[in-house]
Image (spheres, rainbow, N blue to C red):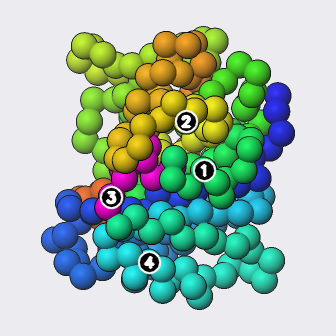
């Protein structure tokens, strides 16, 4: 086991193309689910995990997100929030690489702003921290069984093996686990990272080849709010009170 992550990043620079029918003028991270903006849920998740510093990247309609963050506080001692504005969108990998100077020298959390995690028992990020082993891992991804996802229309992303390692779906018709967008990453993943825009998938594949890509099963449900249908499904789920604390 390793030290608990003290820093985290919220990915909020996406274009939100599939959500444009909900609003052309509001960025997806500010879309409300059960009365609360998606980005607020992501920030609360990191705060409950005990982080002391948070980075949020922005791009599309960045000023609106930054205005919200300027006044956002859950509690007086909430962590400071640093903005990493991307004038040119850097995608997930480039976005995290750019934010590395603010994420410390040890493992850190990264969470997507368009996923709500319905919790069951111990909070998911706390479980990730407890499972993190810096000696063996470069990346630890929170994955959810396909039947416990809402708003997700794919065929799964990964196989989770008995030793905790992940493998890709590859040419299989389906895989039993979906990546939730919540993860712990170590800065060493980015030593040879390219400049500019690229996906974090590059680093997952590198870690997989090195035998250092691991997964942890999420015990609750994953609510993917990437489309109007996903928003509706999340609203119905939360209105029914089917989860404990969610973020």
**Label number found at residue 18:** none
Distance from Cα at disc 4 to Cα at disc 2: 27 Å
Q: Which residue is mark 2?
A: 190
Earlier in the chain: of badge 4 and badge 3, it is: 4
Distance from Cα at disc 3 to Cα at disc 1: 16 Å
Expressed as whole percent of the image width and height from the top left, the position of residue 230 reads 30, 57
Magenta residue check for 93? yes
Residue at (34% x, 19% y) in the render = 169
Residue at (59% x, 88% y) in the render = 71
Q: Which residue is mark 4?
A: 65
Give neighbour class at mark 2: few <14, some 14-19, many 20+ (Cα, 10 Å): some
- Which secondary structure lies at badge 3? loop
Note whether residue 40 is visible. Answer: yes
Residue at (35% x, 41% y) in the render = 198
In what quadrant of the picture does the N terminus appear? top right
Q: How many marks?
A: 4
Q: Which residue is mark 1?
A: 100
Tag nearer the camera, 1 or 4: 1
Distance from Cα at disc 2 to Cα at disc 1: 9 Å
Magenta residue check for 95? yes
Earlier in the chain: of badge 1 and badge 4, it is: 4
Distance from Cα at disc 4 to Cα at disc 3: 15 Å
Earlier in the chain: of badge 4 and badge 2, it is: 4
**Label number found at residue 89:** 3
Expressed as whole percent of the image width and height from the top left, the position of residue 60 reads 31, 70
Residue 4 vs residue 120: left or right? right
Expressed as whole percent of the image width and height from the top left, the position of residue 206 reads 48, 21
């Amino acid at each position: 086991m390793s030290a608990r992550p003290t820093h985290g990043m919220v990915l909020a620079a996406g274009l939100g193309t599939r959500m444009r029918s909900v609003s052309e003028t509001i960025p997806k991270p500010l879309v409300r689910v059960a009365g609360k903006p998606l980005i607020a849920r992501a920030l609360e998740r990191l705060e409950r995990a005990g982080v002391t510093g948070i980075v949020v990247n922005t791009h599309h309609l960045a000023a609106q997100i930054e205005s919200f963050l300027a006044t956002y506080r859950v509690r007086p001692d909430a962590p400071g929030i640093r903005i990493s504005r991307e004038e040119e969108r850097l995608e997930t990998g480039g976005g995290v690489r750019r934010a590395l100077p603010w994420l410390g020298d040890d493992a850190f959390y990264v969470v997507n702003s368009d996923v709500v995690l319905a919790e069951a028992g111990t909070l998911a990020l706390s479980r990730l921290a407890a499972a993190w082993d810096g000696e063996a891992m470069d990346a630890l991804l929170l994955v959810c069984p396909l039947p416990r996802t809402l708003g997700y229309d794919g065929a799964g992303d990964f196989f989770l093996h008995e030793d905790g390692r992940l493998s890709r779906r590859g040419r299989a018709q389906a895989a039993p686990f979906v990546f939730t967008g919540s993860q712990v990453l170590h800065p060493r993943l980015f030593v040879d990272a390219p400049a500019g825009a690229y996906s974090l998938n590059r680093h997952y594949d590198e870690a997989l080849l090195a035998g250092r890509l691991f997964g942890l099963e999420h015990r609750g449900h994953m609510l993917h709010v990437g489309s109007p249908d996903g928003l509706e499904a999340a609203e119905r789920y939360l209105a029914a009170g089917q989860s404990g604390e969610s973020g």
